[in-house]
Image: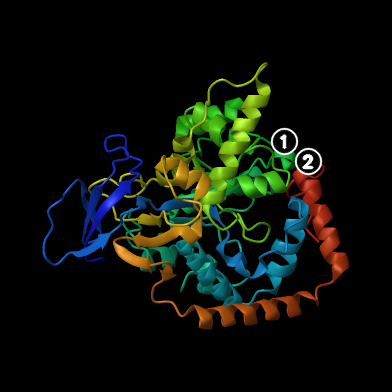
Amino acid sequence: MGGKYIIKNATVVSVDASIGNPNNCDVLIEDGIISAVGSNLKYSPDCTVIDVTDAIVSPGFVDTHRHTWQTQLRTIATDYVLSDYLLDLRHLYGASYTSQDVYIGNLCGALESINNGVTYLVDHSHIMNSPDHADAATPNWRLEDARRVKGTLFPKNAPEDLVRFGFAPSEPDLTPIDQLADEIKYARSIGAAVITAHISYGKWDSGRRITRQLGERGLLAPDMVLSHANTLLDEELAFVKKNGVGLSSTPDTEFQMGMSHPIAFKAKDTGCIASLGVDVCCSSPGNRDLFQQMRLLIQAQRHLEHEAQPGPPLTMSRTCADVLEMATLGGAKVVGLEKIIGSITPGKRADLLITRCDSTRLVPVYDPVGALVLYANGSDVDTVFINGEIVKWEGKLTGVDWPRVREELRASVASVMTRSKKAPQEVLLAGKQYWVDLLSGKKEPGTQAAP
């Protein structure tokens, strides 16, 4: 638990309607909790004073969909569509990871997240090639013994816990519906805090209407986070809204890999809970932080709606505040933690960022919300608090020997690439065609074993 801090002279972007975006504002943090927000706050002599004149204090980003283990594969997929990704990332390089590679990938992916202002993430960790891989991704966790480990290592699995136990079932569009239903029921039986799954991948949508089938079976619930979901039908969005299911959009990969236009704004317009995720780091430099995802989403949505009008647009229907909410409080709502994190609100955990407005991009700043969404990037994040602890200070990660970790990462990259060269190409290509046929609806799940 953190100590006591008084952040003074801030421009606070609170994402709390009752507080707004006050200038010359103080934020008091005590024992990991935001205890007060306001002007000229009184504080005890044992508080550490942080003067943030010419800086913005905002909630930490909540990334609701990330495959953290893929750090070693940065830049590999810059020209990939989804089928290329499935072949190389999931089956070639993923199969070439040792458990130590998984550990290094998760460690460096987490450090990258913190460095770019992410204070909470949903790690969809589909690299459990063996129990050793599972242990490396989350220490002492084994798929085949999930119930025991849940009871032993995650006895509470409470909202205030820093690490919680979640569950990712088999790919819904590629799995027989009865098997998928059984996996979701099992996840709940062992107390998973979050159940997350890819669904309805735009041009890759299998047409099986899995969300509707799950809704008809009564299996949709607020503990679920559906990623992508861009081709959900209106009736499926109605199921999502009715059951409080969260949605996670990842604009960068969705645009690149043929997954159609992100559903985030449409979902929000229909009363669903929308959030943002980074997804992967293998295809774009933007796939490292939520600054880029916010920027890409809002400008693409504005373009889409402007083009749909018969004449020139005279008003802006989508604001920077809309997309900042998705990246912070919206994400907290998706994972059921809106009372714990997601805004600068007294009583919430101190997950927050200090973004310095000193760079050539950020002098001057008239609109602090617009500055965060359309101008800032991770290099402007000076300080990151997680649960009241400073994990980035004056632009550098704390307690991390990055040169040493960096060399471990490079060594891991070399070993993964060496092992990947031994893979039989004919089997890989047959596997790619198998998954393409499943995603396109040419094959039914469970009718033929994968190559």
Ranked by sequence position, the earlier of labels 2 and 1 is 1
Residue at the location (25% across, 65% down)?
A: 2
Residue at the location (47% across, 28% down)?
A: 271
Residue 361 percent location from the top left of the image: 51, 52
Discs 2, 1 touching: Cβ within 8 Å: yes
- Identify the residue at the far right of this view: 426
Per the model, the C-alpha gap separating discs 2 and 1 is 7 Å
Q: Is residue 165 visible?
A: no
The residue under label 2 is 441
Numbered disc 1: secondary structure = loop
- Choose between 53 and 386: the one closer to the eye: 53
Residue 397 percent location from the top left of the image: 42, 70
442 to the left or right of 33: right
Q: Residues within 10 Å of mark 1 (few under 14, many from 20)?
A: some
Tell me the quarter of the image containing the C terminus: bottom right
Residue at the location (75% across, 80% down)?
A: 418
Amino acid on which disc 1 is placed: Gly
- Choose between 115 and 63: the one closer to the eye: 115
Residue at the location (11% across, 65% down)?
A: 45
- Choose between 393 and 314: the one closer to the eye: 314
Numbered disc 2: secondary structure = loop
Q: Is residue 94 visible?
A: yes
Residue 51 percent location from the top left of the image: 27, 59
The answer to whether residue 121 is above or below residue 406 is: above
Amino acid on which disc 2 is placed: Gly
Q: Residues within 10 Å of mark 2 (few under 14, many from 20)?
A: some
The residue under label 1 is 207
